[in-house]
DNA sequence: TTGTAGGCGTTATCAA
DNA sequence: TTGATAACGCCTACAA
């Protein structure tokens, strides 16, 4: 029989139903193991089931002074890069019985700071910031302050991307991955390159472009600055940048897009102009987005273990000792050569 | 100067700092507008800013008896179908200052019920169930019970998919969309079809397949039962089913995959066998997943406004009057013909 | 092992 | 308008 009065069944209802005290009911249901007699425990549990009791998490949080909430901040959950990371975090969260609060920054650094403050109000155990931070000193400083404040509240902040803040960080080796990719492409015979660089203000994009160029320099190849096209770090950005590149220098042999989504937009830009990939021009991306593994021609890219990184981030937050200094976990990328960059016969 | 004692700044700290009572501080910061004198209000706000105060949301929730949390249940956030819906919900949540709690069901109906119970413990204002429910009477009944319990707690449950539970529902017109797609394909000249049906237990998949077949029947075309291949409602499921179909009847003119992700897997299966899409065989999907709009050949599909549906779901939950009976919103799909199904010259 | 009672940070009622 | 003070639902010493 469900409580007919107020709508919600409370622990007190359960205690009464079972004929025990509030404390006993609490211990039997949410308390720290074997502290209550088997018989009473059974009675309480039975009563709870009968009443379909579900503990009020906020009340527990207030009483305990802590929660089992982890906050996740992403630019855009519809972006497969972030949704993969999120999936990894969800798995780890399930394993640890954590609740995940999701927040969108819409790529506005200010919103990121606001949301972090809101998460602080939630008193979560962890806040995970996924995605690349804008390289603006003021913003970075403000974010850093807010992160420190969050940790002062007892939680742990983890960044996924690159080490910019003095917090636990899961860092993708964007530079090294891109460098290796460049080396591989040179091995395949390519000598002239175009780069769809994404935003110059995004660290992730910049690191990848820099790594790629460094890889080329090692092989004594230089990229004409004019062939490095900046723009949005998105599908449309890739499309636009590729169109520009084709106007400027239609003879480059190979194009590196700073992420897969851009690469795919760029491939469409090529098709729009009757340029065949890979016959007329080769194409490589970065990330190895799952949903895009079936595009044709199959895209050469640098595989990032996004789900794993998400899991790692949460684990990192949860196994941190209080006051432990920031830790850094490097996550390498793996070059995957596919059909979009066939060996170049010269 | 930040509170040095306990780590977290509380409202009481703010009140003391401002030299006012707890009540006044509460009203000035979170209370119901113009109840406190301008001067005191300023003092309190200044103190709060100085102390970098952030209200304890759980304490507020306990005191107020309600939260601004909305729970979102998806099978898998990495699936672009769900991440698009989630993005829409995030937008609406931002507009309404709601916090979103994300939960993964991993396609287990039982986990769905468990998570809904957990959300009940959070006392959220809304729970949004995205994704297709398994068509099992017992599970459905249990889910229905849990949904009722959630609403008894003061929240509102919204389903996104099809009307199966007596709750607010945003229903995609899967049947009609697939029917229209079939008609369009017949118009293009196709007469023999294969269907990659996905799971027979998933309502969404079943509705689409049924709609497609109904559309064909209207045109006096029947699909050989052997050419309806069941399997997983995923990329791999599409790949496997297509392989089967090619073994069975390599001469079908056109294949309908019950969603885009399957279609893309199927296209790879074709390529693996040297079957060219669309020259040798045409292909159509369902959903119009954003990330897949650049695949080549461009995929004919039925566009579902996923983000919009997500937004709609949350709005529906929030503008519901207490006790208002369930409402149903139909969301049509739009057939988009692209290169994967060129007009068939006969 | 069980119960009593005080406390967690806010809100809200009721006087002043 | 402002300030005590009683809730809110739960946890946890402390005492029995």
Image (cartoon, coloured by chain):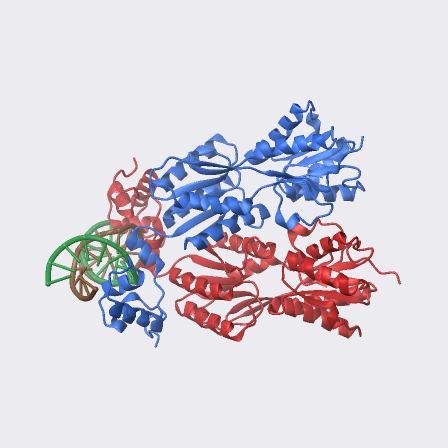
Chain colours: A red, B blue, C green, D brown
Which of B82 and A46 lies nearest the eye of the viewer? B82
Q: Left or right of B32: which side holds A89?
A: right
Q: Residue at x 28, y 50 (%)?
A: A24
Residue D6's place in the image compared with A205, above or below, is: above
Residue A148's place in the image compared with B237, above or below, is: below
Point out residue B103 in the picture as x, y percentages from the top left corner.
48, 49
Residue A173 visible to the viewer: no
Q: Left or right of A132: which side holds B92?
A: left
Point out residue B313 in the picture as x, y percentages from the top left corner.
46, 44
Quarter of the rendering containing residue A285: bottom right
Residue B216's place in the image compared with B148, above or below, is: above
Which of B65 and B178 lies nearest the eye of the viewer? B178
Q: Left or right of A243: which side holds B331?
A: left
Q: Left or right of A331: which side holds B87?
A: left
Point out residue A43 in the picture as x, y percentages from the top left corner.
30, 41
Looking at the rendered image, the quarter that the C terminus of chain A falls into is bottom right
Residue B346 visible to the viewer: yes
Point out residue B208 in the picture as x, y percentages from the top left corner.
60, 33
Which of B211 and A250 lies nearest the eye of the viewer? A250
Q: Residue furthest bottom?
A: B1
Looking at the rendered image, the quarter that the N terminus of chain A falls into is top left
């Amino acid at each position: 029989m469900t409580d007919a009065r107020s709508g919600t069944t409370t622990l007190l209802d359960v205690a009464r139903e079972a004929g025990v005290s509030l404390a006993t009911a609490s211990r039997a249901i949410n308390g720290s193991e074997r502290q209550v007699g088997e018989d009473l425990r059974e009675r309480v549990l039975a009563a709870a089931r009968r009443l379909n009791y579900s503990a009020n998490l906020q009340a527990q949080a207030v009483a305990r002074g802590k929660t089992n909430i982890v906050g996740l901040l992403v630019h855009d959950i519809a972006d497969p890069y972030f949704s993969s990371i999120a999936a990894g975090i969800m798995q780890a969260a399930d394993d640890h019985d954590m609740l995940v609060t999701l927040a969108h920054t819409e790529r506005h650094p200010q919103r990121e700071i606001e949301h972090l403050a809101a998460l602080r109000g939630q008193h979560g155990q962890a806040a995970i910031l996924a995605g690349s931070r804008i390289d603006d000193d003021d913003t970075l400083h403000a974010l850093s302050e807010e992160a420190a404040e969050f940790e002062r509240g007892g939680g742990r902040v983890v960044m996924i991307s690159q080490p910019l803040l003095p917090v636990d960080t899961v860092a993708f080796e964007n530079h090294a991955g891109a460098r290796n990719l460049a080396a591989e492409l040179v091995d395949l015979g390519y000598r002239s390159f175009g780069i769809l660089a994404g935003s110059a203000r995004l660290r992730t994009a910049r690191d990848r472009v820099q790594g790629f160029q460094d890889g080329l320099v090692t092989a004594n190849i230089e990229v004409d600055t004019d062939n490095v096209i900046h723009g949005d770090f998105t599908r449309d950005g890739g499309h636009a940048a590729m169109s520009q590149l084709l106007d400027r220098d239609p003879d480059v042999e190979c194009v590196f897009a700073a992420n897969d989504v851009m690469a795919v937009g760029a491939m469409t830009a090529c098709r729009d102009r009757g340029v065949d990939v890979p016959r007329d021009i080769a194409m490589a991306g970065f990330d190895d987005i799952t949903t895009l593994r079936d595009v044709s021609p199959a895209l050469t890219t640098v595989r990032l273990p996004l789900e794993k990184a998400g899991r790692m981030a949460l684990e990192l937050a949860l196994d941190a000792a209080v006051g432990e200094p920031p830790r850094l976990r490097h996550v390498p990328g793996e070059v995957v050569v596919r059909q979009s960059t066939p060996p170049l016969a010269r």
